[in-house]
Amino acid sequence: MKPTPKKYFLLLLLCNFLASGIYASDPPFSVFKNDPWVNEQMSRLSLDEKIAQTMMITAYPKQNEASKAAVIDKIRTYKPGGVLVMQGTPVKTASWINQFQAVSETPLLIAVDGEWGPAMRIDSTVQYPYAQSLGAIQDTSLIYQMGREFGEQLKLLGIQMNFGPVADINTNPSNPVINFRSFGENKQNVAEKAWMVSKGMQDAGVIPVAKHFPGHGDTQTDSHVTLPLVPHSKARLDSIESYSFRYLSKKGISGIMTAHLSVPALDPSGKTSSLSKKVVTDYLKNEMGYRGFIVTDAIGMKGVRAEPGRAEVEALIAGNDMVEFVPDLETAISAVKEAISKKEITEAAIEEKCRTILAIKRWAGLQKYQPAELKDLTRKLNAPKFGVTQRKLIKASLTVLANQKILPVQNLENEKIASVSLGSSSKTAFQTMLDNYTQIDHFVLPKNASEKEWLQLRNKLSNYSLVITAIEGIHKYPAENYGVSAIQQKATEDLVADKRSVIVFFGNAYALKHFSNIHHTKGLILAYQGTDLARELSAQLVFGAYGANGKLPVSVDQRFQVNDGISLKGNQTFSYTIPEEVGMSAEKLALIDTIAQMGVDEKAYPGCQVLVAKDGNVIYHKCFGFLTYDNELPVEKNNVYDWASLTKVTGPLPALMKLVDDKKFNLDDKFSKYWPDFIGSNKENLIIRDILAHQARLAPYISFWMNTVDKEGNLDANVFRHEPSDEFTVRVSEKLYMNPNYLTQMMDTIRNSKLLPRKQYTYSGLSFFIFPSIIEKLTGQSYENYIKNTFYKPLGAYTITYNAYEHFPMQQIVPTENDDLFRKEKICGFAHDEGAAMMNGISGNAGLFGTANDLAKLFQMYLQKGYFGGRRYITEETVNEFTRIQFPESRNRRGLGFDKPLINNYKKDLLDAFPAVSADQSSYGHGGFTGTFAWADPKNGILFIFMSNRVYPTRENNRLYQLNIRTEIHQAIYNSILQQ
């Protein structure tokens, strides 16, 4: 059967119908167009008031009371449909909005330009990344979450509409106004991202308004100052410029903003697109089928080619529902009335526009308007959950554009690293974060530096194996080459040519084109923005705290093309974040502040610091008090502490674990196999496992120095002197030296000491005096070199060392005790433990120093079953063996070297518990006599580090224990874990 001409016509009509995009979805507010509340408002509004509903005025809450009064007067007199709020603080903005609503007979539609959230216009709020950054993100669910949070925050402020997202496809790298505000040049990427942020806002109850239709992405000029030309054909406009708006229309976006452009392919007359019926009605509404709300861009912009009043008329005639940024309401309303009388526009058209605006207000809940709550508003707007999303977005956007087997930076023992900030005059947040990972020397080169200054710095960098460079101070817009200076270009060129370099670029992706050889650097990370948070997170990426899979959203030049981006895996080093990102509460963790400060106030210690990590993320690290009770030097994160007995599990123990892995050390061998001096003694048959579990019957401790004291209390002059000499070479403290021959006497004293009568748990440090010598014999290296080269340096834990006085300024080292018995001086930088001090400061029982952060790295390696920062140090099997209870049947809680929770600890009251009641039985750690403590919980992923000098000025101070401070803090950590 042949098709009839009528059927051909119907088929053609259907094809045109489908091709035109008429299958656009209705926006969610459309169901309220005939709502009773809307009908009631329509019935009571006069024509002037209906016209006024199509007008939106502007308010600047940062201004004074006179400015506010003028806006209120306009609202009372002319009854506009809405107010666009610009700059201001959260509370002042919300307060003004409340006052505006209070004097308006019909609830106002409050809008804001919030492309990257309220922070675009309102200070003291979370600044989410710019659209260009977001364009690099591969997980669109993050974009949706961001949009939803936009909506939540705007509703807190009393705002119902957001003039965003920017849906323009930025195909012109020189675009002077859109540029970084666009999600990029790929039309599908832009459309999807624009929809996800819009859907998030709509789902949160806020109207999104996509801009700038029909597409501002390929213009050479700024519509704020002139009328830009979009020179493309209709086919090109359909394919590129308007693509995202078609996509959004089909998805059901509520609002679209019309731009002030010259688009000859749509309107050859040259009329501004926002005022063109051919663009707004014929193209957007009829051809594309859009059925949502349409608003102009600011009507006072220079791209508008019409007089005030007439511009508003033409905008409404063109098909816009609302005119934004109306400067003269009286003139605009009068002009529209005159146009109605001249039949340029019908009253019915005004009524339909008014009904649309009222339906939006009804959808937004304004029929039951409630003022914004001002109490705690700024705090609510900065809720931690918003910060979590902000961090996730930045991390997901980071784009690796070059990686010649250098990222993430690891094998730290082989590197001497410098960082250079090109474009800064002082140390940056990027460089400060780098400090957490390893020893780095920092340099800066201001943008206006001279070539002589660069040459001097270049010479200084010659001794470094790796230079991590941050390029800073890049402008958002293309003018003046994005602010790139000649010295930045020169320095980058030289660094790439001279050095193994990793470059992190903080700025607009397009600005990369101004760096001629940057693509040849060993590693290149594009961070898009120069916020402090972006700096911190980029520094973490350099060392592998997490992976990267960002893709370049734009083409820069032939070197850097759209969708470029190298995937990078994290290497299980530390990340530094906020508690909420790992399911903990910062508010609950604040109890730690109270407890720690109480310890200072009660003189349990002059000062302390607490570090908490969860699942490899450091989420709390704070300092309290001072180094001494003189209150001169405050505690700082880089302070170096005497770890005392924590040395046992951080010095000899990791070495022994590694030797077990290397089959050089057997836990069930006799100790005398490795220390033949015990053969023939009462210790010949002691088993290593028993010794490490503290049940080998060894005496708890020997005060070696007291064996040298005569009846008058004087030290034996054959053993100790106050000046060094050829015979007295062992430095015990600043003013005390020992004859090295006495070391043999110390070992003999251990050999000849009596064993305890029963085999049961009794803590003893004696074997740890000997383990360093055993380790030296088994490795063929000095004990200190072995543990530094095998563990500390690769971990980036460069502060862990013996004899801190040799490595750090004295003001960085935390003093321990005013020793008035043995050394008769204040101990600082020398081992507090007398026995360790007599071992030239290098012992297995005590003597190690280091920062809290570096101690945390070592313990996190244990928590991660022997793996950290891209390297396996110890096998998982060995870590499990050392950290399990060895002899539960004998009520001995200890692991091998490690302490463990009390038996049935979970049943105890907090006052009687050790450690926290909630610490899992699989957890382990150790404490130090000086007031230090480290505890790892593999089941809960919790690491707790506590540093103090509770023995200052005297070891007789036991208030740290009496006040149960460490256990209370430890329990507070568990109490902060949020229930899922």
Image (cartoon, grey):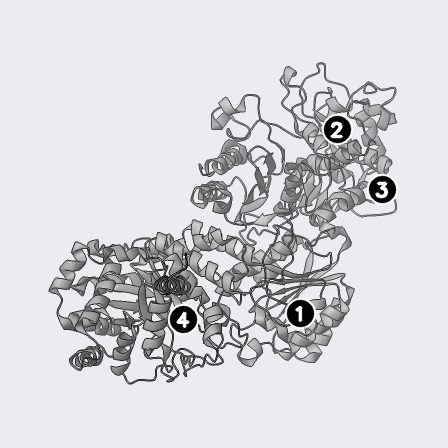
Q: Is residue 283 left or right of residue 658?
A: left
Foreground mark, 1 or 3? 1
Q: Secondary structure at mark 2?
A: loop
**Quadrant of the image occupied by residue 768:** top right
Residue 588, position in %: x, y?
43, 41
Contact (CB < 8 A) between labels 1 and 4?
Answer: no
Q: Amino acid at mark 4?
A: His
Number of the label disc, if any, that sits on residue 559: 1
Contact (CB < 8 A) between labels 3 and 4?
Answer: no
Residue matched to label 2: 766
Quadrant where the C terminus sits is top left
**Quadrant of the image occupied by residue 84:** bottom left
Callout 2: few (<14), some (14-19), or many (20+) C-alpha neighbours within 10 Å?
Answer: many
Q: Secondary structure at mark 3?
A: loop
Q: Secondary structure at mark 1?
A: loop
Foreground mark, 3 or 4? 4
Tally of numbered tags = 4
705 to 789, vertically: above or below: above
Foreground mark, 2 or 4? 4
Name the N-terminal-most of marks 2 and 4. Answer: 4
Q: Secondary structure at mark 4?
A: strand
Residue matched to label 4: 212
What's the distance in space between the residues labelled 1 and 4, CA to CA? 30 Å
Name the N-terminal-most of marks 3 and 2. Answer: 2
Name the N-terminal-most of marks 1 and 3. Answer: 1
Q: Amino acid at mark 3?
A: Gln
Residue 507, position in %: x, y?
56, 68
What's the distance in space between the residues labelled 3 and 4, CA to CA? 69 Å
Q: Amino acid at mark 2?
A: Leu
